[in-house]
Image: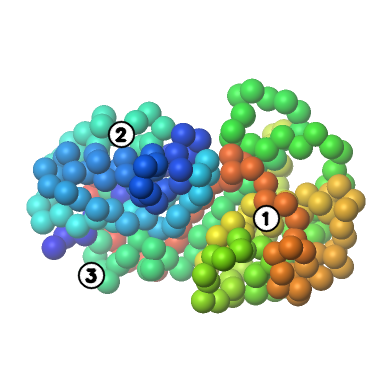
Amino acid sequence: MPRYVLDIRYKGTAYSGWQTQPNAVTVQAEVQRALTLLCRQPTTCYGAGRTDAGVHALLMPAHFDFAQALHPRFLSAINGILPRDISVLAVHRALDPQYHARFSAVQRAYRYQLIFHKDPMRYQMATWIKEKLDFDAMFAAAGVILEYDSFESFCKANANNKTFICQMFASHFAWEGEVLVYHVRANRFLRGMVRTLVGTLVDVGLGRNDLAGVRRIIEAQDRKQAGPSLAPGGLYLSEVVYPAGMFERVL
């Protein structure tokens, strides 16, 4: 059966995360509702990750199986059904029969946005830090993350992970105008990991910790040692990478 891949973008403010849950409004449920209407049969889609409540996605790949060729106007049709805060950017067809939106991914990237003055246009889209920060210290601490591959200290308690190993490829800050963005890339992430990483780095900027302290936190393998988990509104899933040749764009 043909397998199709949707490139989905969403503002997560109104949703209880990506994954379907009883008695909750989720992004996955909205996408599946639209697919079921268009495909005229119950249709399940599987995303590349499980963003938490209030977290956004610039790109969330999700696949579904459908026996027929998609209508040429499928892309405009699904966007007409989906709410305004969810859109499908493109549609691909999987070329590899083993392709899976979650398990085939080899890298994922997130960004976390920090602002330093009250801005109603970025409310729930970035986290406002009111205190003065030592940016040089934060930037140096971000580089320390790349020295390690085990991150139990940044994982939510009782997350039932089989392993806390993550291969890190990038961890750095960059200014985008008045917004300070933390960029992080790895082969996988633990539940709640990025928001706690940023909270720990902000603690460094506040003078509550230093580079040696960040190393001690990581090596302790204890969530209680790490900084706070920052608000979900600043976090975005920004990219998911797959091996070349797994799918081709059709719409």
**Residue lying at 24% horizontally and 65% vertically, measured from the top left:** 95
Task: Pick whichever, 214 or 3, lies toward us.
Answer: 214
Disc nearer the start of the sequence (3/1) = 3
Q: CA distance from mark 3 to mark 1?
A: 36 Å
Q: Which mark is residue 196?
A: 1
Count neighbours of disc 3 (C-alpha within 10 A) and say few if under 14, some if 14 to 19, many if 20 or more: few
Image coordinates for residue 135, horizontal then vertical, percent:
83, 47
Residue annotated with mark 3: 97
Image coordinates for residue 208, horizontal then vertical, percent:
88, 53
Quadrant of image for the N terminus: bottom left
Q: CA distance from mark 1 to mark 2?
A: 31 Å
Residue 136 seen in the current view: no
Number of marks: 3
Q: CA distance from mark 2 to mark 3?
A: 28 Å
Q: Which mark is residue 82?
A: 2
Disc nearer the start of the sequence (2/3) = 2
